[in-house]
Amino acid sequence: MAKKYRVGIIGHTGKGGYGHGLDRVCAEIPQAEVIAIADPDKSGREAAVERTGAKRGYAEYQKMLEKEELDIGIVASGYVGDHRDMAVACAEHGCHIYIEKPFVQDLQQADDVVTALEMRHLKLAMAHINRYSPVRMMCNKLVENGEIGEVLELRARGKEDSRGGGLDLWVLGTHVLDMMRMFAGDVDWCFGRVLENGQPITKSDVRQQGGIGPLAGDNVTAMYSFQGGNLIGHFASRRAMAGSPSRFGMKIYGSKGIIKMESRFLGPSFVLKDSSWSPGRTGSKWIPITSAGIGKPEPRTDVQYGNRDAMLDLIDAIENDRQPIGSVYDARAAVEMIASVFESHRQRNPVAFPLVNRKNPLTMLEN
């Protein structure tokens, strides 16, 4: 018989809650059974026990990890400030991990989690569900097959709602920055700029953002170098600049056209086969891309199952001793891309990867 994985879920009702359905991810995974819930809020804990079918509930996640023999810990808390300690505790009790985004608050915390996992030969999967999207996989295949020619640049934007700027970079930018690495590989360097009310941020602009930690900026722009400078990626976000529909997502510009991707699990992507990138001049059309290919109907209807696919991949990674598709190293790399924007702004120069400074750059800003 296939192994049944014992799962414990950590949430925090009233302090970030449970992120994006991570508490319900095991509902349709026959290989996993939710054994326990940890949530310090009594009513929230009882509700989570009922909706997940957990056998027991705990007010403290440390006690749950001590008393239950778990195989996988789901760090579902939406409060990022707790993620490092929760993930390290799971690792110390021999649990593989599935974790909500953003990963952790800074690179030192990321390094701590990586070390805790490596010491015990454990796996972590990050809830960057675009990595598991069959539409995204099809886009990757089309790029590899030369559908838009040689890739020349990447352009991504955040959601640009009331969170636009630094908060958008952390909370939603983590998805599209991870998408950049999916297509372009590791980053060589970053050059970033962060403004507040039209002026470069200084120490006086830094505030504490619940869960995230030190934060600043309502206008963020960043340039990333990939593949030894042969490929450049851009990210930008400005507060309250969202259109309808949102620009949130990424475009891949190639010598023969463009692929445009939304940041949704089964959200349609589009290809423009036009080397001028100007359909107004050429009359070319944007053609939908689905998991079946260009211009074909989407065969999948399970639009909410990005987390399920990620958990299934984590289980397969455990059983075959490989890294998950979205591993702890990918999670750390996304944090590094975020931190590099603020570090570049602080140094007023491009910064090379890996970053030497592993602390939050905003704690080191000067006026």
Image (spheres, grey):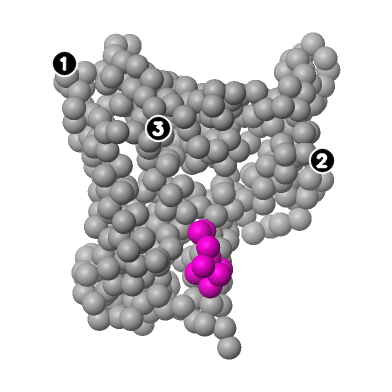
For the question of whether residue 54 can be seen, the reply is no
Of the pair 122 and 249, the residue shown nearer to us: 122
Residue in the image at 55% along x and 38% along y:
185
- 114 in magenta: no
Q: Main secondary structure of the magenta part?
A: helix
Labels 3 and 2 touching (C-beta < 8 A): no
Residue 139 appears in the rendering: yes
The secondary structure type at the circle numbered 2 is: loop
Q: Kindly identify which residue carries mark 3.
A: 353
Query: Mark number for residue 367?
Result: 1
Q: CA distance from mark 3 to mark 2?
A: 39 Å
In the rendered structure, the answer to whether residue 168 lies left or right of residue 274 reads: left
Task: In the rendered structure, find residue 57 and report the number of the disc placed on it.
Answer: none
Where residue 46 sits, quadrant-wise, is bottom left
Q: Disc 2 designates what residue?
A: 295
Crowdedness near tag 2: few (<14), some (14–19) or many (≥20) residues, C-alpha within 10 Å? few
Q: Picture coordinates of residue 226 (x, y %)? A: 53, 29
Give the x, y percent position of residue 48.
36, 69
